[in-house]
Image (cartoon, rainbow, N blue to C red):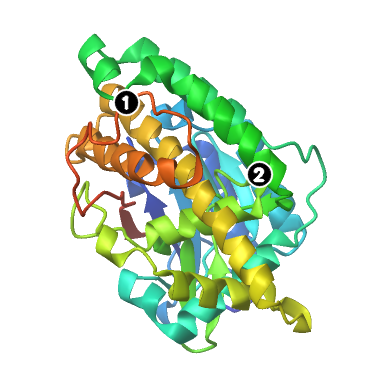
Amino acid sequence: MQSSQYSRVIFMATNQEGSLEKGNLPEELVKILKSLALEWGDDWPGKTQENNSRSVLVRKYGERRDLFLDSEEEMKTFEWMSNHGYGPRLYGYFPYGRVEEFIHGRTLSQNDLWNPEISALVATKIKEFHMIDKPGSKSVILWMELRNMLSDAKRLCSPEIKNEFGLENLEEEIDILEKELSKDSNEIVFCHNDLRGDNMLFNEATKDLTLIDYEYACYNAAAYDLANHFCELAANYNSHHILDCSKYPSPEERQRFIRIYLSHKGHQPTKFEVEKFDVNVEKYTLANHLNFGLWAIISDVRSTNSNFDFLGFARTRFQQYQLKYPKYFNEKLSKSKDTFDVMEETSCYETNRITIEI
């Protein structure tokens, strides 16, 4: 990294339940920023020269963020990724936050994700991510996580909600999904597990794409990651609880994406390979709907975000789960498939970012 005579440290904060203000920065954060400024030839927070500015990204999280995340494991993952040249470089941690490299680019909109050129780039980048050989256990924790979330949902929600979503009998369906999907010889890879446009940075100048935010990254079936991405294509980011299911990719659109994904490093997949992978992806959308449906039920009780209709989100996720389940499995659902009115829309979530100059 080249140094300049002057540099200006700017930070962008991702806020959950807290905020960062220039006059009230954590001591550990100030030390990191001063160290970076010194490395770059500056004496921050003294006077700087604006045309030689540098930027870093400072992420500040709320204390309630740990409800769905293993923060210690996420820190290890991000640090390992940084040390091996994947994604943003890590500069340091402070209580409830970290400082990382600021990557120039913009997050992808829903229209971007449907752009054929960008979509092809996304497919390629996902495949590259899946080729990361991160050391440690390669056991799939998806099913354990679903059972843990189901247990939390049953413990936290009201009897009415528990009955509406058929939670008492849902563990049996999770058992069926695990048993059946484990039969399908799905490739287990290092997955991102949250492949939405907000977690992809596109550089217009270089046409490069970077996958960011590894909070949920772990080993999983490759098909699950693509299932998650396809579900996110139906997200309506102008609404706080809606998925527009008419925008879910058609078989032709899914298989075009899958063919690019499988074509990495010159491999030419057969029609059979593409179609088989597509079927596995479709099956894994069931696990994805359960995952985010249960997340929403729990969040309705625990979250302080009053602008998000968590139960509306959960209903439409469970609705899609119940519509698709009979297509692949003959076992009776815990609730009849017409329990929830058939709707054509479901939900998403956003992360707010603010830029502060210091």
Residue 307 pos. (x, y %): 17, 40
- Identify the mark nearer the N-term, 1 or 2: 2
Which residue matches tag 1?
A: 335
Q: Is residue 5 left or right of residue 295?
A: right
Q: Measuring 50% from the left and 54% from the top, which residue is drawn there?
A: 282
Q: Vertical placement of 92 versus 210: above or below?
A: above
Q: Nearer the viewer, residue 92 or 217?
A: 217
Q: Measuring 59% from the left and 42% from the top, which residue is drawn there?
A: 93
Residue 180 pos. (x, y %): 62, 38
Quadrant of the frame with the N terminus: bottom right
Which residue matches tag 2?
A: 218
User: How many residues crowd around disc 2 within 10 Å: few (fewer than 14), some, or many (20 or more)?
Assistant: many
Identify the mark at residue 302; answer none if there is no mark. Answer: none
Label 1 or label 2, whichever lies nearer to me, is 1
Look at the image and tell me whether residue 56 can be seen: yes
Q: Measuring 29% from the left and 16% from the top, which residue is drawn there?
A: 162
Look at the image and tell me whether residue 100 can be seen: no
In space, the residues marked 1 and 2 are separated at their CA atoms by 31 Å
Q: Is residue 124 left or right of residue 304?
A: right
User: How many residues crowd around disc 1 within 10 Å: few (fewer than 14), some, or many (20 or more)?
Assistant: some
In what element is the residue under mark 1?
loop
Q: Vertical placement of 272 versus 135: above or below?
A: below
